[in-house]
Amino acid sequence: MKKLILIDGNSVAFRAFYGLPLLSNQSGLHTNAIFGYARLLERIIKEEEPTHFMVAFDAGKSTFRHKEYKDYKGGRQSTPPELGEQFAPIRRLIDAYGIKRFELDEYEADDIIGTLSMMADAEKMKTIVITGDKDLTQLASEHTVIYFTKKGISDIEEYTPEHVREIYDLTPEQIIDLKGLMGDKSDNIPGVPGVGEKTALKLLHQFGTVENVLENSDSVSGKKLQEKLKEFSEEALMSKSLATIHREVPLDFKLSDLEFKNDTEEQKYELFKEYEFNSLLENMEAAETEDISDFNVEHTENLHELGTKVSIHLEVHADNYLYNKPEFIAVTDGEKAYVRSIESIDEKQLEEFLNSREDVNAYDIKRQIALLNQLGISFNNFSNDIMMASFLLDPSTKIIDVSETVGPYGININSDDFHYGKGRNKKNPSEEETIEFLTDKVMAVHKAKDKMTAKLAEDEMSELYYNLEVPLSKVLADMEIRGIRVMPERLVGMEEEIDSRLKEIQSRIFELAGEEFNINSPKQLGVILFEKLELPVIKKTKTGYSTAVDVLEALLDKHEIIQYLLDYRTLSKLQSTYVIGLQNEVKEDSRIHTRFNQTLAQTGRLSSVEPNLQNIPVRLEEGRKIRRAFVPKDDDHVLLALDYSQIELRVLAAITGDETMGEAFSGDLDIHTKTAMEVFGVERDDVTSTMRRNAKAVNFGIVYGISDYGLSQNLGITRKEAKTFIDNYLNSFPKVKEFMKSIVQDAKRDGYVKTLLNRRRYTPDVHSRNFNARSFAERTAMNSPIQGSAADIIKLAMVNYAKDEKAQSFDAELLLQIHDELIFDVPKDEVEEFLTVIKDIMENALDIGVPLKVEHGYGSDWYQVK
């Protein structure tokens, strides 16, 4: 069947430009509109399979409509130069696809498209018009559909005659009558002043056309509207004429000349390389391989028939793999596959098989190790983890399942949600269906591995992947399986204490309010604070007064009740989330088994879930007391915590090469005191506690890319004072200032920044025209190399500890990683000797040119450690 695609060239270019952040290649050419165009063409060609194709452009600023109305399209803002420079490359792109393009003096792209769609209608050829201009909806017909790009170029609304009727209760031809009455600000078409869409539609539903409306203006309800229609009748008729697409453009070609063959891969490839469209290049390279469904995989009943290089997948359809046994296993060497239910396998045979393989790969090896452990199989000698590889290659992508991970590499399989269903649409697949699904899944892992590791090598991340992240997954798996012992009775005792304290606070709040009310109800609390106690209203919401934390904090000095309310909220959250919440997480082995997320934070930091043990609020004494419940395995052991001291500032000194900062760390000076000396120009003995506090705030603020506004909020000073303080700081540490400037330039040039171990963080918004988005991206560029390097260092220490023979000779166990801190369970009689070994491992995890320092503490529970 013949199918014609017609693209409104200028309109789509504008949509692509404003729909994507401002990108550029290494030669300095802005490329976001070109890239958006290429993505649209790829999508249309794949989804619509056109036989004929044309892109129409506006030829110039002057058209036949300007002769009718000289102010037509007047007042439009000039094309941004960043977009203007992309029109010629867009035309080159269209040529590279082998797509015809056309423009003609005096006519607009709309007219060219209108003429071609009428010719196609006559031949009953299906036509799709792609535009960001609703004027073209007048062309919708039985054979022509208008794809209107609503936001950018990905959100498309399809306009058929039925859809036009559904929205406006008009025919497509009446769109010009609608524009005649209401005008069009974007094209500076005047219409009838005071007539908006609602009135125009009402008139057209009654009279059908502009001409009929004007002829029957005396019958229109409302004297003022009658007068407007009579006064501006000529403008209405002219506006309709301006809005009407001219469908008799003199073309020097026929529809048959627009045939699209889709056979210009080489030309496209070269252009993608020139414009540095890496994702499109990868898709082209991936498309050269077969989809997973095209592989003819032979199933075997004998594991040992498989080769020495295999991929394995144990399947459990549950988030928490620590407590749910695997249901199926799938193993492949790329030619044969072994897939069956867990009940039918021999665990001993599987363990022997795995330990005899040269190369074992998987998706999420941490999960696979834990599932094998549930079968009584001790195996963690995995070679590759494609989930981890995917995260390193693009840390901004949310890791969902195997199908999402392998899709960019030309391997298409069904998603977990498709196979199992979701929510109300949950399915109960048969064993045969699941075996087929898992065959695809494990084959996808096997086929994607080489592509992904090759890309890691290209991006100089092989060492980060093989020497850090893959071995770390094995360390984390052991930690998750091991867990940490908890004494729930201590949490129960805390619950009773906090409950008693909450009752005391509640009584005091009621006393100060003069009545009882629901403290947890923002509506009731708002009435008490702002009506009864007449406190100043800080902020309002749609439902009433805001009683958010920032509002309460702003009222602290206005009434005694505010501090009690803040304390009540803090303790209530502590009680429900941690004191009660953690009791529910203690398992039969008297331990809590948190899971560590290795593929979430783009800086590379680990996070902790179910439960989150990294965010126990320790600023409050009640929060710190929660740690009393975490204890070593028995009375002969202690918990030992080792914490990197000011690691991010040390990394900052190393990355920037700032001599003043480096000397402070080398001389073991207090960095905040040293900063205060430099910024305030005083001797060490003259540094006050306030000076040191301010210096500390700006030290850590710089690491996180703090703004003058942020610092002013932290220190309670004016924004001007904060800016002066930051300026003085940067003048005192010139290499830091130089780094902050150069790293943003690197991000703009490369599109990413790197840690000391080459971990990438992409920063597309550094080119954004939105100030807030651009500022955030610039701060990200500044702090990611610092935070990411600090994260890499502690993870490297964990890996080095696991492979250090001397460290492993102790009866010590690594239990938790909390930000810059490692927590071990160690026998009391081994603490001092083990401490010497582990401090040496941590302080020499990576030579950054600035000494790393580790502080420690130990005790009979986590609370006593510090």
Image (tube, rainbow, N blue to C red):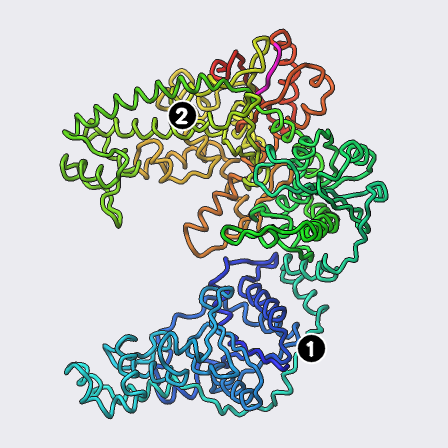
User: What percent of the width, then of the height, locates residue 310?
Assistant: 78, 43
User: What percent of the width, then of the height, locates residue 640?
Assistant: 56, 16
Q: Is residue 821 visible?
A: no
Observer-nearest residue: 803 or 345?
345
- The answer to whether residue 726 is left or right of residue 377 is left
Residue at the image point whose x is 14% and y is 83% from the top: 223
Which mark is nearer the camera, 2 or 1?
1
Which residues, given as a range, are shown in magenta?
A: 823-827
Considering only vertical position in the picture, is 162 above or below 400? below
Q: Residue at label 1?
A: 261
Query: Is 245 one of the magenta-colored residues?
Result: no
Q: Residue furthest top?
A: 829
Element marked by disc 1: loop
Q: Residue at label 2?
A: 681
- The answer to whether residue 243 is left or right of residue 855 is left
User: What percent of the width, then of the height, locates residue 554?
Assistant: 25, 35
Q: Is residue 577 visible?
A: yes
The numbered dot on residue 715 is: none
Residue at the image point whose x is 61% and y is 59% from the top: 27
Element marked by disc 2: loop
Amino acid carrying mark 1 in the image: Lys
Observer-nearest residue: 693 or 341?
341
User: What percent of the width, then of the height, locates residue 630?
Assistant: 51, 19
Considering only vertical position in the picture, is 196 above or below 217? above
Considering only vertical position in the picture, is 241 above or below 462? below
